[in-house]
Image (cartoon, grey):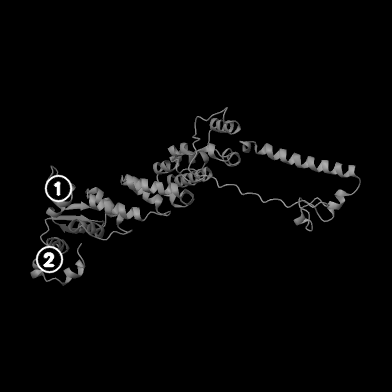
């Protein structure tokens, strides 16, 4: 660490700086003031020239050693056009001092340069900074960066966070920017804490964004095509049967054979086991059902609950309709009650036919 180095160097007289600075500070002073530089870099889009010292660079990076002494050793100005001047200078300053600010604006370019020139100490600092900034908004981005830079520790840390907070991350906008391989890693995990409906809908949104990026039509089959391997990790058997019937069967993302296979599975999973899609449960658990409240005791005379005896009858009765229903002889009331029960039964039967898959 070099405390207050910039202020100290600005106040330092050129004639006596060697007498007052440590060896590390002397090297840094020579770099900052471009004294006796023996290698030059042409940096950034404007081609600004920045000098450095071979001895320092070679002592920190084996890539620089090969660059200066290998069979294809650089003899002139070295071009580094892919990064800007200030970022490359901050990288070289780290080589001289083992110090320097790392923030959200420069961490990725410093990580890129550290990987390019094999500076492990800076790589570890950048990865640690990224790991400390992990949250719902950055998890997908950091997973993608871990994949790009082959930092498996960072990628797995971000993946674990996504699985733990899946309901927030999968429904957010940032998941649309990850690559297909990272998306497949998320969908493949058994630790994903999200219902399969949200996994499926996340896949559709990601595929729609990918179709737009590729300039493809946004149809069901196009979405399946761009999903690639990620599609096979959607666990369709874990979808609610009614949702599958209403939202998946009508959408052209499954083949006819797959639709038939899933339909048979929903009807009788023991007789028709699946061959295509996984049925392994995920870490997500449905919330426990609400405990129904106890019904109030029935009123001995009216047959209604005591708490609602003075209120308007429920179940569709209008004012005076209950009295009309109970009018006449006992046989008349029985006929009316039988007709009413048949109507209710027909309604239940019709609903059951529509939700045949729900019974499983």
For the residues carrying marks 1 and 2, which lies nearer the camera in this image?
2
**SS class of the residue under badge 2?**
loop
Give whichever of 348, 31 is nearer the camera.
348
Q: Earlier in the sequence, mark 1 or mark 2?
A: 2
**Label 2, on which residue?**
21
CA gap between label 1 and label 2 equals 27 Å
* Residue at the right extreme, as displayed: 329
Give whichever of 176, 56 is nearer the camera.
56
Q: Which mark is residue 65?
A: 1
Q: Quadrant of residue 190?
A: top left
Image: 307 above or below 209: below
Name the spot of residue 112 as percent of width and height, x first: 27, 51
Q: Residues within 10 Å of mark 1 (few under 14, many from 20)?
A: some
Q: In the shown orientation, is residue 204 left or right of residue 16?
A: right
Q: In the shown orientation, is residue 235 left or right of residue 115?
A: right
Q: Name the residue: 43% across, 37% down.
A: 229
């Amino acid at each position: 660490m070099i405390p207050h180095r910039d202020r100290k160097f600005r106040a330092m007289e050129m004639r006596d700086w060697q007498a007052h600075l440590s060896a590390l500070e002397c090297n840094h002073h020579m770099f900052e003031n471009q004294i006796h530089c023996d290698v030059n870099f042409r940096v950034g889009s404007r081609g600004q020239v920045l000098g450095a010292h071979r001895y320092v660079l070679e002592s920190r990076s084996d890539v620089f050693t090969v660059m200066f002494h290998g069979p294809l050793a650089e003899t002139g100005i070295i071009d580094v056009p892919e990064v800007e001047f200030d970022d490359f200078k901050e990288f070289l300053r780290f080589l001289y001092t083992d110090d320097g600010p790392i923030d959200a604006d420069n961490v990725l370019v410093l990580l890129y340069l550290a990987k390019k020139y094999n500076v492990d100490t800076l790589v570890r600092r950048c990865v640690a900074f990224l790991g400390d900034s992990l949250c719902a908004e950055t998890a997908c981005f950091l997973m993608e960066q871990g994949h790009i830079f082959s930092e498996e520790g960072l990628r797995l840390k971000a993946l674990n966070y996504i699985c733990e907070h899946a309901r927030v991350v999968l429904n957010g906008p940032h998941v649309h920017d990850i690559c297909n391989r990272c998306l497949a890693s998320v969908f493949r995990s058994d630790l994903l804490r999200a219902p399969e409906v949200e996994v499926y809908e996340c896949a559709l949104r990601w595929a729609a964004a990918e179709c737009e990026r590729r300039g493809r039509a946004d149809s069901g089959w196009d979405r399946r095509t761009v999903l690639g391997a990620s599609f096979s990790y959607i666990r369709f058997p874990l979808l609610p049967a009614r949702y599958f019937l209403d939202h998946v069967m009508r959408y052209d993302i499954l083949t006819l054979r797959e639709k038939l296979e899933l339909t048979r599975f929903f009807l009788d999973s023991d007789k028709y086991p699946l061959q295509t899609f996984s049925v392994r449960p995920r870490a997500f658990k449905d919330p426990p059902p609400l405990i129904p409240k106890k019904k109030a005791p029935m009123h001995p005379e009216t047959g209604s609950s005591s708490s609602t005896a003075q209120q308007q009858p429920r179940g569709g009765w209008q004012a005076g309709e209950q009295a009309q229903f109970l009018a006449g002889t006992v046989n008349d009331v029985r006929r009316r009650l039988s007709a009413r029960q048949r109507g209710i039964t027909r309604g239940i039967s019709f609903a059951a036919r529509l939700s045949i898959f729900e019974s499983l």
